[in-house]
Amino acid sequence: MPPGPSSSPVKRIIAVVGPKGGVGKSTISTNLAVGLTAMGYKVVAVDLDLGAANLHAMFGLRKVQHTLDDFLLNKVKDLNQLVVDTNIGALKIICGGDVPGIASLPYAKKISLIQHLAKLEGDCLLLDLGAGSSFNVVDFIIIAHKTLMVTTPEITSLMNVYSFIKTVAHRRLEIFFRRKKSNDLLDLLEKARDPDANPHLKTMASYFNVARRIDMDLANQAQKILAGFEPLIVVNRVETAADANSGEVIRKLMEQYLDIKSSVVLTIREDKTLKKSAAMMKPVVLEFPKSSFAVDIMKIANLVVA
Amino acid sequence: MPPQVVIFSPDKLRGGITKEVLRRAGIETLLISKVAKAKGALVADSPQALVLDTMGCLPEEINILLEHCRTLKQTTVILLGRSSLIEAIAADRGNTIPLSDPLDPELVAEKVKTAMASPPGLNTEEPQDLQADLIEFLRLE
């Protein structure tokens, strides 16, 4: 089973997830890493978009000797051998690779990677995860102290965020019940995955109501675990008040149907400077520190380390 | 045909630059620096966009123009000025785009073009109920 957040040299692990591709997740990861570095933190950013790495391009790093592929293909045993200087203060990155099929990680390899990530040294470890809701994305969130869910105001992106968080919630419960060897609650969770056949399990609250009748103690423990999941919703490319409000709408639905009560909604305004800095292959926070994007990123940086 | 875009700016330089950049982008505008005239233009012309430069504006002037725009649902308001002020205003209204300083006239032109590309009257409808749509598409009920 994937380990939970545990004592490790890395003080804060921040996962940046964008279930729908193209929402600006890597741009946000890059600039957030730079912002945290500017605040004085020792940051290691890891490109976990397996098979489709691009973080190194965001930093303009053209010649990278070793990537995460080397670890996953057993060419190197220690992740520290893959850490690369970005020449931006103390910020370092581990570049992702692009070996076809590498995203379908075997379970044991994934666990090994997660364990090694948690041992990296630094103040902040920033995980730039791939798109989608596969367990090879979801399971990396389990070690994160803070999870940023990046969306845009479009309804399809919001739907992906909701579905992703639902997957994370189910996965956390599954892992917990497997650890506790509670087959009854696992069976109930399986039934909850088919709300058409089991409408009485449609919401997470109704699931726990039934679960408590089976095993009150375990159900309460599981509910507490879920209560500890506090994703920060980040709505990117905001242009109007309605755009900004879309994050609040999805937050309410998560509270109502998934019992996820404590998510914070942040917004990042649409900003023309992104195109300019992308062309320069330099982070916006460095090149245009007074731009609205940079200002919004720094607000997020302050929040994730608070 | 009356201009489809009104620029209100008490600052001659900012207003002039914005008007010129919009002109080069093929957009004819009416530049006004007095509130009473701006009100008159909004009533007479029902423009598709109002570029409201808050720099140098008195708070009452901003309020008067925004109040007027409430009755013109098809008018997109593009606010220019200090981020702390215009963000607060935009948060309270729909169909408003805040573009914080430093002034970027090309970005203003881009936003005006977008506003003009929307068919007139489209914005008069109430915004789609996002929550209801999400509930339906996610099959939550």
Image: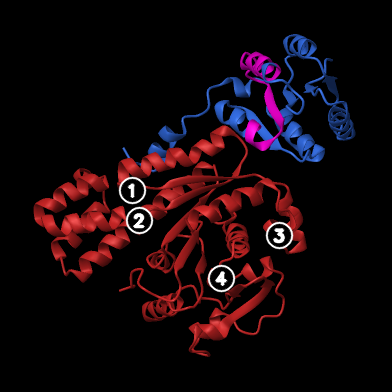
Chain colours: A red, B blue
Q: Nearer the viewer, mark 4 or mark 3?
A: 4
Q: What amino acid does circle 2 point to?
A: Phe
Q: What amino acid does circle 4 point to?
A: Lys
Q: Position of residue A113 (x, y in %)?
A: 44, 78
Q: Earlier in the sequence, mark 4 or mark 1?
A: 4
Q: Earlier in the sequence, mark 4 or mark 3?
A: 4
User: Depth check: B35 or A269 in front?
Assistant: B35
Q: Determine which residue is flagged by label 2.
A: A229
Left or right, residue A224 beside residue A283: left
Which of the numbered marks, if any, corresponds to residue A134?
Answer: none
Residue range in magenta is B61-86
> Are the residues flagged by discs 2 and 4 in contact, CB closer than 8 Å?
no
Is the residue B84 above or below the residue A216 in the image? above
Marks 3 & 1 on one chain: yes
> Are the residues flagged by discs 3 and 1 in contact, CB closer than 8 Å?
no
Q: Quadrant of the N terminus of chain B?
A: top right
Which of the numbered marks, if any, corresponds to residue A42?
Answer: 4
Which of the numbered marks, if any, corresponds to residue A286?
Answer: 3
Classed neighbour count for the residue bearing mark 2: other residues with Cα under 10 Å, few (<14), some (14–19), many (≥20): many
Q: Residue at x 60, y 74 (%)?
A: A92
Q: Residue at x 62, y 79 (%)?
A: A84
Q: Secondary structure at mark 1?
A: loop
The Cα atoms of the two marked residues, 4 and 3, are separated by: 17 Å
Classed neighbour count for the residue bearing mark 3: other residues with Cα under 10 Å, few (<14), some (14–19), many (≥20): some
